[in-house]
Image (cartoon, rainbow, N blue to C red):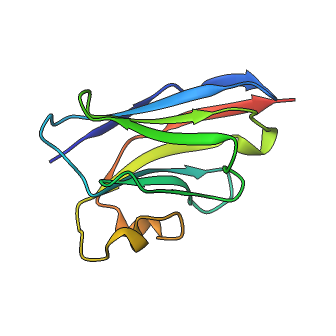
Amino acid sequence: QVQLVESGGGSVQSGGSLRLSCEASSDTYRPFCMGWFRQAPGKEREGVAMLDSDGLTSYAEYAKGRFTISRDSAKNTLYLQMNSLKTEDTAMYYCAAYDDMSGGHYLCAVFNPPLAYKYWGQGTQVTVSS
């Protein structure tokens, strides 16, 4: 069983930056698709950014130009660099992954619902104040 552990959340002022990290417990784990979701109080969990094994990315509209997803394979760690943060970015951020390649690159995207992801981290809180 692979465990994903997020870190890097915190409290920042509007316009600030944070970098979230997600480390997989297994050095040999190479998921087909990894990404970040977020969930604000009273709202559904939504996809923020995804990255597949070929390096293809998918971003939510609000994340484009502000957030960057990346991976350090040597460290088995996924990152989300978040710049120009806004108060509406306040949420719990979750790392998620799945292995099934049958859907191809098309399904490693922000529109693919949380049910598609097999592994989840515990979440890290991001709070942006004005």
Q: Which percent across, then down, holds residue 40?
A: 66, 50
Q: Residue at x 74, y 24 (%)?
A: 16
Q: Residue at x 43, y 30 (%)?
A: 21
Q: Residue at x 17, y 44 (%)?
A: 29
Q: Which percent across, then down, holds residue 108?
A: 41, 65
Compared with 75, 106 (above or below) is below
In the shown orientation, is residue 51 left or right of residue 27? right
In the shown orientation, is residue 104 left or right of residue 67? left
Q: What is the quadrant of the C terminus in the image?
A: top right
Q: Which percent across, then down, holds residue 2?
A: 19, 45
> In the displayed image of the protein, which residue is found farthest to the bottom?
103
Q: Residue at x 37, y 68 (%)?
A: 105
In the shown orientation, is residue 45 left or right of residue 70? right
**Quadrant in the picture for residue 12:** top right
Compared with 25, 35 (above or below) is below
Number of labels in the image equals 0
Q: Which percent across, then down, holds residue 129?
A: 81, 29
Q: In the image shown, does 118 or 75 lie closer to the viewer? A: 75
